[in-house]
Image: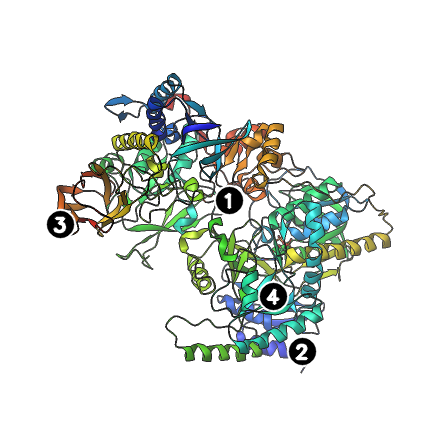
């Protein structure tokens, strides 16, 4: 079976990409491993409101609308279909496992939109036992939203990002007690109004610069031990404190799901942990694009949607060209920048660059230099480490060649 | 001076308040201390050739040495009469039960936990040892070497993945070849075949990921690895297929012993009347022996911590498992050459004088993960599996010297297991001394997986001998079928075969665990096996669903739902492991959603 383009993963990014592709091609395939479309949207409450391209949706209504559009545009959709492997010869051969057996689909271009996953418990290096009651945030969401059951009575939440606070809100509504929120960083990882609404109003203590150092309990969790962190991020011995709870929810920042990218041997970014891409979102595997949370963790839906579309348009136009890549460099005030690469043979007039600062920064100017000469700047009153920023740069007709050096600075 | 007087003197020197006496041929220690190390030292000091063993009853702090976890109570086994009762569902108990099922006997196994292999047998590193390191302990050496040789056939019969890719001991300097001469002498004595010294070129052809400093290696081709959990379950399931019975959640609580005969065994599910009892209770073997009034030994728990690395780092030990030789010193980066050499020579001398500490190994598992460890520590607690992160960090740091490529971020899991060691440090495999109808199989601390087939054969023979003597008929079970169809992982099948399988059962095409690519069909097979266990951990251990990078955070709710449907029960009844390990507390009422 041959397809113009195959989109793997049907979260917001994948859905939008498939719709975009269907405007240009009548030979599009969307593959989803679960039995429903929507990815993480499946864990949304009905009262939650998403604003996408100016329109308001509940998560469910958004999925429904997209699915309808896909059908109208004759996009082939395979649910319950798991991409087990992708092999490359002249084209990509995608091995898909489903109830019907194993199918091999061939395509020149692939869009990877497999979303993000929670890091596992063990990567937190928590000592003690591993009883029932230690869950990652997505596991709790699955129990609540898809199995209508509550896995906790009294929780400690590890992480203070927006996802964590949304879940806490939901749990409070369900009558679950929240004993503490523990955050490794020196500042809360979501905006003040949300912190106030969810934590302060319910008198939930927030332990900043703390980590979970140990878990207690044989069968079900009975307590956790928290420890203070030094400015170097090391545990301070003697600062330990025990908090009774039956559940520990690990709400780390998500990390991109990169299994398929690794199988394709794509170069990965040290900073986003997703693929290293150029300004069209193409990875180091020619014709393979990475979008949505499997590229970087988006904090802005509009960016996610417009990028997904942009990547898809480029993917459909893609034909093999000689690549001429240069790096984008950045200083230590950034936690990452994406794309990290610019392909000089692609459009240089409107390059979208995203970044997150490494911590909250006030009154900063972003300066972009090309070979030491400033080519662009932008002032920011405040930058939050959990909010992504976008800036567009134009380096066309500036005589950029493969020895040019582009640097992003925050001063 | 009599040996007991000598022992008393040494023990008193450790702690004056300890008492030593001799009773029924064993050395008995009593007293109390707040220093656990003193208890271990006293136990070791009480060793003597003139006694059966050491019974160390010195108490520690306010720690009560009692059975853990509450047991559910019913009377489903009340008045059950059996020929043979095996206590303990670890690899030893399971292997013995399978051997017994070769005879027309009424044999059962009881296990206090909700699943098999919940202790040592499910918490080890799965190495099939060569036996070389056990030369000082005759039983360990004998059963390990013999057991090792039985794995080719057994793993085929039971369809358990097994690899015999050899083990390596790396040496750095030429003078360390001295160690090889020692090893080869031992190998000859113990009949371990194929042991040879190889040079850098050969060792790299066998193990291309060997550390740079390794200039020579001792190659032990009989070494291997197995999945110990699958192996234990397969042994027990094959026994059940051949007529034996396994009762989980069933704890031996006490025994009624009269005139040197165990009349009955009390469990939480009723009183059982066995003709013969086999004690394979691992860490609690001394407690069981005590109940049977046949105790001559003490189990002192030794905790081992190990670290599991992600599959993606398979190239660290792509072919073999390896270890640094105990006399090799790897120079720290800031050591000068001379300091390194001097330390090496010192190590060599001290090695000859006394046993140096155990080396950590890099273990290539049959499932392609790499395990580092174990790091061993004495502990008063028999079933405390908590992990000390400092030990995890230490393992990673130490092992980086052997395999510099290892990164902390490659670590996907860490766990502990607790060895059931005796002070004598050798296995206790014997018929009862003071009680006639018991066979003790205790102190199986290291290498018990490897030795299990050989131990089981020996114990079954002893049991048959006993039955013949008391006039119980025990003819061969003519229908015994050694073959057990284990639950297979179909992702490794060639595409066409996998496709065919899915077409015969569409559930093989529904992937539930994405990291390990495990299908609904495989999970259901697991629940249709002779000993089905409806818990998340049971599924995880049997078919690795939830063992991958995300450690079950995506698939565990899916599996909970599958278990609920298959067991036709309320979702709240599905547990992580045993009855106490609740996952879900209540359901969301429709109106509050
Ligand atoms: C960290 C570590 C690494 C190891 N690595 C290896 C290795 O690489 N290769 C190797 O060959 N060996 C290894 N071993 C050793 C091996 O795991 C053991 O020797 C072996 O598992 C012992 O099996 P067992 O059946 O005697 O004990 P266990 O597996 O402990 O089984 C005993 C069972 O008895 C049950 N029980 C206890 N009391 C009662 C009661 N009153 N009523 C009912 N049931 C009871 C327990 O619940 C338990 O399940 C390792 C051990 C450890 C701890």
Spot occupied by residue B575 in the image (x, y as percentages of width and height): 52, 37
Please state if B77 lies on the left or on the right of B218 as rendered.
right
Dot 2 alpha-carbon crowd within 10 angstroms: few under 14, some 14 to 19, many 20 or more: some
Q: Which residue is mark 3?
A: A373
Residue B150 in view? yes
| Residue drawn at (57%, 58%) of the image | B320
Circles 4 and 2: CB atoms closer than 8 Å = no
Residues at marks 4 and 2, CA–CA distance in whole angstroms = 42 Å
User: x%, y% of residue A257?
Assistant: 39, 40
Q: Secondary structure at mark 4?
A: strand
Residues at marks 3 and 4 on the same chain: no
Q: Chain of mark 4?
A: B
Residue at the image point whose x is 58% and y is 48% from the top = B118
Q: Which residue is mark 4?
A: B219
Residue to which mark 2 is pinned: B3
**Chain letter of disc 2 in the image:** B
Judged by depth in the image, the label closer to the viewer, 1 or 2, is 1
Q: Is A397 displayed left or right of B560 in the figure? A: left
Label 3 neighbourhood size at 10 Å, few (<14), some (14-19), many (20+)?
Answer: few
Per the model, the C-alpha gap separating discs 4 and 1 is 31 Å
Counting from the top left corner in percent of width and height, residue A333 is at 21, 50
Say which label, 1 or 2, has the lower sequence index: 2
């Amino acid at each position: 079976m041959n397809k113009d383009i195959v989109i793997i993963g049907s979260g917001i990014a994948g859905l939008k990409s498939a719709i975009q592709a269907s405007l240009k091609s009548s030979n599009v395939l969307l593959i989803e491993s679960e039995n429903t479309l929507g990815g993480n949207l499946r864990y949304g409450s009905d009262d939650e409101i998403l604003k996408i391209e100016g329109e308001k949706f509940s998560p469910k209504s958004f999925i429904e609308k997209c699915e309808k559009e896909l059908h109208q545009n004759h996009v082939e959709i395979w649910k319950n279909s798991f991409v087990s492997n992708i092999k490359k010869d002249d084209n990509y051969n995608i091995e898909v496992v489903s109830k019907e057996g194993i199918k091999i689909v061939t395509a020149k271009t692939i869009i990877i939109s497999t979303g993000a996953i929670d890091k596992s418990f063990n990567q937190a290096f928590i000592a003690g036992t591993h009883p029932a009651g230690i869950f990652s945030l997505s596991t709790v969401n699955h129990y609540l939203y898809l199995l209508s059951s509550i896995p906790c009575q009294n929780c400690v939440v590890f992480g203070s990002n927006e996802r964590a606070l949304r879940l806490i809100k939901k749990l409070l509504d369900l009558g679950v007690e929240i004993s503490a929120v523990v955050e490794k960083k020196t500042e809360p990882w979501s905006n003040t109004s949300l912190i106030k609404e969810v934590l302060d109003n319910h008198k939930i203590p927030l332990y900043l610069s703390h980590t979970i150092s140990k878990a207690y309990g044989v069968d079900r969790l009975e307590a956790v031990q928290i420890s203070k962190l030094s400015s170097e991020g090391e545990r301070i011995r003697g600062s330990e404190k025990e908090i009774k709870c039956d559940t520990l929810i690990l709400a780390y920042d998500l990390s991109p799901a990169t299994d398929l990218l690794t199988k394709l041997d794509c170069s990965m970014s040290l900073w986003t942990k997703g693929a290293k891409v150029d300004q069209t979102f193409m990875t180091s595997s020619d014709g393979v694009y990475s979008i949505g949370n499997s590229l970087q963790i988006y904090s802005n839906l509009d960016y996610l949607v417009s990028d997904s579309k942009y990547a898809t348009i480029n993917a459909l136009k893609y034909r093999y060209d000689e690549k001429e890549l240069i790096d984008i460099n950045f200083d230590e005030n950034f936690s990452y920048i994406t794309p990290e690469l610019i392909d000089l043979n692609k459009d240089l007039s409107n390059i979208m660059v995203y970044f997150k600062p490494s911590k909250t920064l006030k009154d900063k100017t972003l300066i972009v230099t090309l070979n030491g000469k400033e080519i662009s700047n932008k002032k920011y009153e405040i930058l939050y480490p959990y909010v992504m920023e976008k800036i567009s740069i134009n380096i066309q007709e500036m005589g950029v060649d493969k020895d040019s050096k582009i640097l992003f600075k925050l001063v | 001076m009599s040996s007991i007087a000598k022992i008393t003197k040494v023990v008193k020197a450790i702690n004056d308040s300890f008492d030593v006496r001799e009773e029924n041929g064993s050395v008995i220690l009593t007293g109390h201390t707040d220093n656990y190390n003193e208890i271990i030292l006293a136990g070791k000091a009480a060793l003597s050739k003139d006694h059966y063993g050491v019974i160390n009853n010195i108490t520690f702090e306010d720690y009560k040495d009692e059975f853990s976890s509450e047991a559910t109570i019913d009377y489903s086994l009340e008045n059950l009469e059996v020929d043979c009762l095996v206590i303990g569902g670890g690899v030893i108990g399971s292997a013995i039960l399978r051997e017994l099922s070769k005879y027309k006997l009424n044999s059962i196994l009881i296990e206090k936990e909700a699943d098999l292999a919940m202790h040592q047998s499910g918490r080890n590193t799965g190495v099939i040892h060569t036996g070389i390191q056990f030369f000082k302990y005759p039983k360990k050496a004998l059963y390990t070497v013999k057991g090792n040789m039985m794995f080719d056939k057994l793993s085929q019969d039971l369809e358990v993945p097994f690899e015999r890719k050899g083990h390596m001991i790396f040496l750095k300097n030429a003078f360390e070849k001295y160690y090889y001469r020692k090893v080869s002498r031992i190998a000859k004595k113990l009949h371990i075949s194929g042991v040879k010294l190889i040079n850098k070129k050969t060792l790299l052809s066998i193990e291309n990921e060997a550390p740079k400093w390794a200039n020579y290696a001792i190659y032990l081709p009989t070494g291997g690895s197995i999945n110990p959990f699958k192996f234990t379950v397969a042994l027990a399931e094959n026994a059940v297929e051949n007529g034996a019975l396994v009762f989980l959640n069933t704890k031996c609580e006490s025994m009624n012993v009269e005139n040197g005969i165990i009349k009955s065994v009390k469990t939480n599910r009723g009183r059982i009347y066995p003709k013969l009892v086999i004690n394979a209770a691992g860490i609690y073997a001394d407690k069981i022996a005590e109940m049977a009034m046949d105790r001559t030994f003490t189990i002192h728990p030794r905790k081992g911590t190990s670290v599991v690395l992600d599959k993606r780092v398979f190239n660290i030990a792509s072919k073999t498992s390896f270890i640094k030789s105990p006399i090799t010193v790897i120079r720290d980066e800031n050591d000068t050459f001379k300091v390194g050499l001097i330390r090496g020579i010192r190590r060599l001398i001290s090695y000859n004088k006394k046993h140096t500490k155990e080396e950590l190994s890099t273990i290539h598992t049959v499932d392609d993960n790499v395990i580092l460890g174990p790091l061993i520590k004495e502990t008063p607690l028999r079933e405390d599996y908590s992990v000390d992160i400092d030990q995890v960090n230490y393992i990673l740091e130490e092992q980086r010297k052997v395999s510099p490529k290892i990164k902390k971020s490659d670590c996907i899991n860490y766990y502990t297991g607790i060895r059931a060691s005796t002070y004598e440090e050798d296995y206790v495999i014997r018929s009862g001394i003071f009680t006639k109808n018991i066979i003790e199989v205790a102190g199986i601390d290291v290498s018990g997986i490897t030795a299990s087939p050989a131990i089981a054969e020996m114990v079954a023979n002893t049991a048959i001998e006993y039955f013949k003597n008391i006039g119980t008929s025990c003819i061969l079970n003519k229908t015994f079928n050694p073959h057990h169809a284990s639950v297979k992982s179909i992702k490794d099948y060639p595409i066409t075969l996998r496709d065919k399988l899915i077409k015969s059962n569409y559930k093989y095409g529904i992937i539930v665990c994405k990291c390990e690519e495990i299908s609904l069909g495989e999970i259901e097979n697991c629940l249709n096996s002779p000993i089905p266990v409806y818990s998340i951990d049971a599924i995880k251990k049997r078919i690795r669903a939830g063992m991958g990078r995300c450690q079950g955070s995506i698939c565990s709710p899916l599996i909970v739902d599958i278990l609920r449907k298959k067991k036709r029960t309320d979702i709240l009844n599905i547990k992580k492991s045993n009855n106490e390990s609740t996952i879900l507390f209540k359901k969301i009422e429709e109106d509050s959603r």
